[in-house]
Image (cartoon, rainbow, N blue to C red):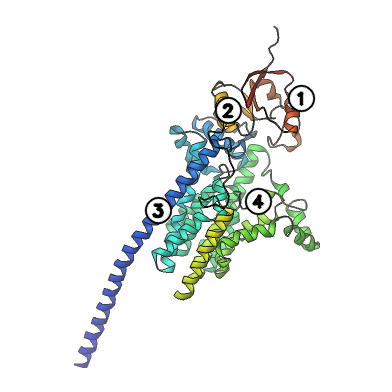
Amino acid sequence: MNAQTESSGTIDQLRDSVGARFRGGKARIRDTSVWAWASILVAVFHALMVTRLQWDIHRGLGTSAYDVGLYDQGLWLLSRFDAPFVTLMGRNLFGDHASFILLGLVPVYWIVPGVETLLAVQAFVIAAGAAPFYLFARRTLGHGAYGFLFAAVWLLNPAVNGTNLENFHPDSFLGLFLPIALFAALSDRWRIYWISVVLCALVKEDVVLVMLPLGALLALRGERRRGIITAILGIGTTLFGMFIVMRGLIGVPTRNAWRIPFGGPSGFLKELFQRPTNVVKHITSEERPVYLWKMLAPLAFLSFLAPEVAMVSALVLVSNIVSTFWYQFQIEYHYSIVAVPALVFAVIVGLGRLDEGRRRAMVFTVVVASLLTARAWSYIPFRADEYPRWGQDNPAAVSAREIVDEIPADAVVSAYHSLAPHLAHREEIYMFPNPFRIVLYGPDTSTEGQRNPRADHVEYVILPIALNADEQADAETLLDDFEITMSNDHWRVFQPVETDP
């Protein structure tokens, strides 16, 4: 009798427990649905807002040959089944960076080619990156509201928005693929993980900077075999991209070795061991400490709650801080977005280790920090100061469109950097003063300042009337055998002087 009573009580407890979980599950499903829709709406709004702003910037001549015109020309050539030799930079598109993810945009270019397509794709890809943060925060912290808040934290991040408004870069795809990879790795979703890791490997040759520490993270979590495969894939991707693809196309594995101080990798290591104080002085000079502060402040410095996850960003942050290239240690540029996903995931993992009371307080702190830093450093509707730009109705932009409409579609053109993206759908276009004087052109830096023989084939040169002193000097010395054939209040068109037969 006692055994039967005990058995009956156990069954009742189990039934009550299952019923409670089922009821709780229904509540969670209902709750998740509301917050999921809220996250989707916020992400779509963000993408539309950024796209509209970027289109206005582009139409107002706020984009440039570097770094959107060159991608536009390369993809346009690929969409026509031509070799993607980008005359705006004098290199094959994949010799500049082994960004094979761009091949996925070729079918899009069959339908809607153009800079505006690239800018819209970038905005929606980055906004879609909010989804893994929502899913992981909901799962780890136990409520859809937390998921929504961390989706917003991603969308508010100044480094994320800096990339969004810096022309176009393939690195922006890591704003989606890397969060998916981290979500899958921390949730044991291995099929999704490997798909996302392969997609990451297609983005750029330097993806080893995140894949190597990602593999280390898996090893620390007991997934040693998967971690080793991830690290090997990252190293292999970099070696293949640099020493097979890029060196095969442009003759050298990279044109950016000069960014490593003290004479390159070996010189830096030598300085690090022999004169470490010089290295310390370097990494604390200029704005590098401020850069690190700006990367961590939007998350209230709480990434340290899960240092093993935050370390996935370590190599990216170190490479940016060490670099001699000023843009790498500024949050407004695309070099920083790759570091953000692991820093945000580290916050979520760390908060999951706290009790509910402290968790709520820390989430509130992160949200406030995100809002304050977004207002100060990001490009959002409540930014402290208006984003500086010309709009599409600016007189200089309107008159530029008038000029562009008069240029034949198959003409060889050398154009001012901000006008080049509006003329890039042609086989041969240059950013003035190229090809008359080589500047940031081709794989061989020793030719800098020389005249490219292709200058003899240029049919149109388009320059603004208002030029700085150096630009004016170039126009006067390099175009002495050209004459002005068209002009308006803001622009001049030069063509070669016709000679008598």
Between residue 58 and residue 204, name the one nearer to us. Answer: 58
Residue 499 position within the rendered picture, expressed as x and y whole percent measured from the top left: 70, 10
Residue where numbered disc 3 is placed: 40
Mark on residue 477?
Answer: 1
Numbered label tally: 4
| Chain-order first, disc 2 or disc 3 | 3
Q: Amino acid at mark 4?
A: Gln
Between residue 5 and residue 421, name the one nearer to us. Answer: 421
Q: Quadrant of residue 473?
A: top right
Residue where numbered disc 2 is placed: 400
Q: Amino acid at mark 3?
A: Ile
Outermost residue to the bottom: 2
Residue sitting at x 46%, y 53%? 195
Residue 291 position within the rendered picture, expressed as x and y whole percent measured from the top left: 65, 57
Report if the CB atoms under discs 2 and 3 are less than 8 Å apart: no
Residue where numbered disc 4 is placed: 328
The answer to whether one can see residue 223 in this image is: no
Tell me the distance, in whole angstroms, between the alpha carbons under discs 4 and 1.
34 Å
Report helix, strand or loop for mark 3: helix
Report helix, strand or loop for mark 2: helix
Report helix, strand or loop for mark 4: helix
The answer to whether one can see residue 177 in this image is: yes
Front label number (1 vs 2): 2
Front label number (4 vs 3): 3
Tell me the distance, in whole angstroms, between the alpha carbons under discs 4 and 3.
31 Å
Report if the CB atoms under discs 3 and 1 are less than 8 Å apart: no
| Horizontal side of residue 354 vs 30, given as left or right | right
Tell me the distance, in whole angstroms, between the alpha carbons under discs 2 and 4.
32 Å
Tell me the distance, in whole angstroms, between the alpha carbons under discs 1 and 2.
24 Å
Q: Amino acid at mark 1?
A: Thr
Outermost residue to the left: 1
For label 4, count other residues whose C-alpha is less than 10 Å away and answer few (under 14), some (14-19) or many (20+): many
